[in-house]
Amino acid sequence: ERLLILNGPNLNRLGKREPDIYGKETLKDIVEQVKRISTPFGVEVQDFQSNHEGELIDRLHSLDESYIGVVFNPGAYTHTSIALRDAITSISIPVIEVHISNVHKREEFRHTSLLAPVCIGQIVGLGVQGYELAARALLERK
Ligand code: DQA
């Protein structure tokens, strides 16, 4: 069984990017932490980051039945991408949307998610711990 940590645009810059908003931890640190909690469940963690919408869509399409779910931070595509929403609805694997920052405290254009209605849940504003919390939710419902 496998779990995918999927990250959208600019999240490759975590650790360097606006650390006052997104913290100092890197994507690698986040993936390591999710691996630590998934191993006891016998679940292998895969991770993929892309700055390109189509690549994120292709990765979602490529998931087979061995995946228990996806922890997905779509970055700014959250607020714009009908195509990613359709990709999530085209597969039957549960997706949890994660945002490091509390998008509701920020600019109004970040208050809307086109993806949340097709995800099983959403974790917002808890920092990078949100990835771990989402992974735990998937591991415990499997
Ligand atoms: C984000 C919030 C988005 O609004 C923003 O575009 C990001 C990061 C977050 O994790 O807080 O790139 O998804």
Image (cartoon, grey):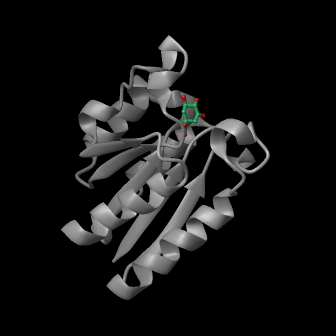
**To which quarter of the image does residue 114 belong?**
top left
Q: Is residue 82 above or below residue 91?
A: above
Image quarter (top left, top right, bottom left or bottom right) of the C terminus = bottom left
Image quadrant of ligand 1 equals top right
Count of marks, rendered view: 0
Q: Residue at the location (38% across, 63% down)?
A: 135
Q: Is residue 55 above or below residue 40?
A: above
Q: Position of residue 80 (x, y in %)?
A: 47, 21
Q: Which of the 4 image quadrants contains residue 3?
A: bottom left
Which residue occupies the extreme top position in the image?
108
Q: Quadrant location of the N terminus?
A: bottom left
Q: Nearer the viewer, residue 136 or 66?
A: 136
Residue drawn at x 44%, y 45% is: 98
Residue 80 visible:
no
Residue 87 in view (yes/no) = yes
Q: Seen in the image, is 10 located left or right of residue 53?
A: right
**Looking at the picture, how far across and down is residue 78, in whole percent?**
46, 30
| Coordinates of residue 86 in the picture (x, y in percent) | 32, 32
Q: Residue at x 47, y 40 (%)?
A: 125
Image point (39%, 20%), residue name: 112
Quick check: 126 left or right of 23? left
Taking depth in this image into account, of 73 and 104 the one nearest to the observer is 104
Frontmost residue, 22 versus 52: 22
In the image, taking residue 2 as reference, residue 110 lies left or right, namely: right
Residue 43 position, x and y percent, is: 38, 79
